[in-house]
Image (cartoon, helix red, strand yellow):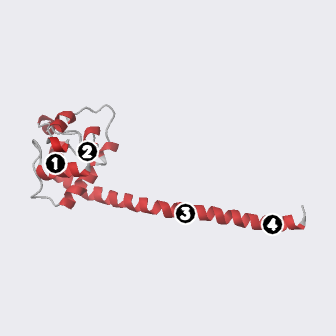
């Protein structure tokens, strides 16, 4: 190795460290909005949980599969693909206006509280045990045609 080669080793190492540091900072900056959105979503779901337990769990159970009473009334498994594929607007409409045995909550819950409950319901698809069966198709078919 020549003297020039030895002198360039620290420069190359320093350049590699700078590039690696730049990549780490870049990834962190890009991930920050996602982490913040995830934190907001978690906070919203946490806020919705208490409302859900107070207003919905008697029929839907604590995490959505439905209680015996709820199933007898046709309450769907809220963690099912059929319910989870509904848009937030569709779920707001159901919660606001009611459907079948689900009462309307437009006079008792603000739109934000309904959105919080929906954020909590969105966590149910991650908790659903394999092979869970439900009345979801029957309930979905009873939605108004414009909402299906």
Quadrant where the image shows the N terminus:
bottom right
Q: Earlier in the sequence, mark 2 or mark 4?
A: 4
| Disc 2/disc 4 C-alpha distance (Å) | 60 Å
Q: Earlier in the sequence, mark 3 or mark 1?
A: 3
Label 1 Cα crowd, 10 Å radius (few <14 / some 14-19 / many 20+): many
User: Which label is found at residue 94?
Assistant: 1
| Disc 2/disc 3 C-alpha distance (Å) | 35 Å
Q: Earlier in the sequence, mark 2 or mark 3?
A: 3
- Residue name at image x 31 percent, y 43 percent: 125
User: Which residue, given by chain and number where applicable, does mark 2 sit on?
Assistant: 86
| Disc 3/disc 1 C-alpha distance (Å) | 42 Å
Name the foreground residue: 90 vs 28: 90
Spot occupied by residue 108 in the image (x, y as percentages of width and height):
11, 58
| Disc 2/disc 1 C-alpha distance (Å) | 10 Å
| Disc 1/disc 4 C-alpha distance (Å) | 68 Å
Label 2 Cα crowd, 10 Å radius (few <14 / some 14-19 / many 20+): some
Residue pushed farthest front?
Answer: 146
- Residue 98, compared with residue 133, is above or below; it is below
Q: Are marks 3 and 1 in contact (CB under 8 Å)?
A: no
Label 3 Cα crowd, 10 Å radius (few <14 / some 14-19 / many 20+): few
Q: Are marks 2 and 4 in contact (CB under 8 Å)?
A: no
Q: Are marks 2 and 1 in contact (CB under 8 Å)?
A: yes
User: Which residue, given by chain and number where applicable, does mark 3 sit on?
Assistant: 26
User: Which label is found at residue 8?
Assistant: 4
Q: Earlier in the sequence, mark 3 or mark 4?
A: 4
Is residue 116 toward the left or the right of residue 103 in the image? right
């Amino acid at each position: 190795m020549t003297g020039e080669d030895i002198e360039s080793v620290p420069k190359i190492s320093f350049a590699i460290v700078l590039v690696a540091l730049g990549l780490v900072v870049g990834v962190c900056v890009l991930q920050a909005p996602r982490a913040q959105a995830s934190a907001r979503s978690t906070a919203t779901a946490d806020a919705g949980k208490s409302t859900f337990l107070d207003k919905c769990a008697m029929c839907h159970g604590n995490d959505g599969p439905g209680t015996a009473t709820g199933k007898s009334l046709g309450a769907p498994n809220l963690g099912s693909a059929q319910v989870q594929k509904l848009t937030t607007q569709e779920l707001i409409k159901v919660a606001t206006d009611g459907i079948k045995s689900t009462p309307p909550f437009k006079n008792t819950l603000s739109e934000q509280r309904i959105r919080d409950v929906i954020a909590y319901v969105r966590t149910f698809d991650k908790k659903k045990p394999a092979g869970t069966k439900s009345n979801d198709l029957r309930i979905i078919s009873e939605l108004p045609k414009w909402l299906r």
